[in-house]
């Protein structure tokens, strides 16, 4: 039986989180798209104004009673957002469990912890994205009562990357408008 502990991520976890982000990107066949570093994670999660939150799952070796550094075997990143229809919401950006530790309840435990934290913040719902070929995750989400919003209401996810944002600004920002 695998024993694990879930806790808030700390700044000194960022190198291991970065390793797992890379593992997840390889699993999702998108390794070439990872552009951030552990330094970015430190700045964005532990800086003056944290941009996201993270939890980690750490392996507790059998018979271990000692505290201290334990191997990280999973992470989840999330942040709070706001819906003009429903109020406070939570977006779960990444949930990852190392391949050799999957199927042991670790991912569900991290997911449930984010749900608990979201409810404590009075969030109306949680949302996330999943690649369409990840059938095992999709099946799990549906078994747990989650809705595919594309199927249910036709919502599509769009993304505007940096170059498109810059182009939009350059092409549409009139010089006589100021934003304070």
Image (tube, rainbow, N blue to C red):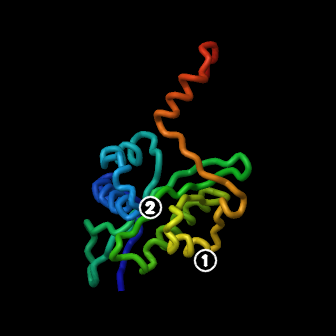
Horizontal side of 95 relative to 98 (left or right) equals right
Q: Residue at x 43, y 57 (%)?
A: 54
Q: How many marks?
A: 2
Residue at the image position 69 percent from the left and 50 percent from the top: 87
Q: Is residue 27 positioned above or below 62 on the image?
A: above
- Image location of residue 12, percent across then percent down: 29, 54
Lateral position of residue 37 relative to residue 134, left or right: left
Q: Which mark is residue 143?
A: 1
| Left or right of 69 on screen, residue 126 | right
Quadrant including the C terminus: top right
User: Could you tell me how far apart the alpha carbons at marks 2 and 1 are, in whole angstroms?
Assistant: 20 Å
Residue 28 appears in which quarter of the rendering? bottom left
Q: Nearer the viewer, residue 103 or 70?
A: 103
Q: Earlier in the sequence, mark 2 or mark 1?
A: 2
Expressed as whole percent of the image width and height from the top left, the position of residue 81 reads 59, 49
Q: Of tags 2 and 1, which is closer to the observer?
A: 1
Give the residue number, with chain letter if any, for mark 2. Answer: 76
């Amino acid at each position: 039986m695998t024993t694990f502990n879930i806790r808030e991520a700390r700044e000194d976890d960022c190198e291991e989180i970065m390793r797992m982000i890379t593992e997840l990107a390889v699993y999702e066949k998108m390794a070439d798209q990872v552009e951030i570093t552990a330094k970015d994670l430190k700045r964005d999660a532990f800086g003056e104004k944290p941009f996201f939150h993270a939890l980690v799952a750490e392996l507790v070796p059998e018979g271990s009673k000692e505290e201290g550094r334990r191997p990280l075997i999973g992470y989840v990143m999330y942040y709070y957002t706001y819906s003009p229809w429903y109020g406070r919401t939570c977006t779960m950006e990444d949930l990852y469990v190392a391949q050799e530790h999957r199927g042991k309840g670790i991912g569900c435990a991290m997911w449930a912890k984010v749900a608990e934290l979201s409810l404590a913040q009075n969030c109306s719902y949680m949302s996330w994205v999943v690649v369409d070929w990840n059938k095992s995750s999709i099946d799990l989400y549906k078994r747990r009562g989650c809705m595919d919003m594309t199927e249910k209401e036709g919502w599509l996810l769009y993304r505007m990357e940096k170059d498109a944002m810059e182009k939009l600004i350059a092409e549409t920002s009139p010089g006589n408008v100021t934003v304070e």
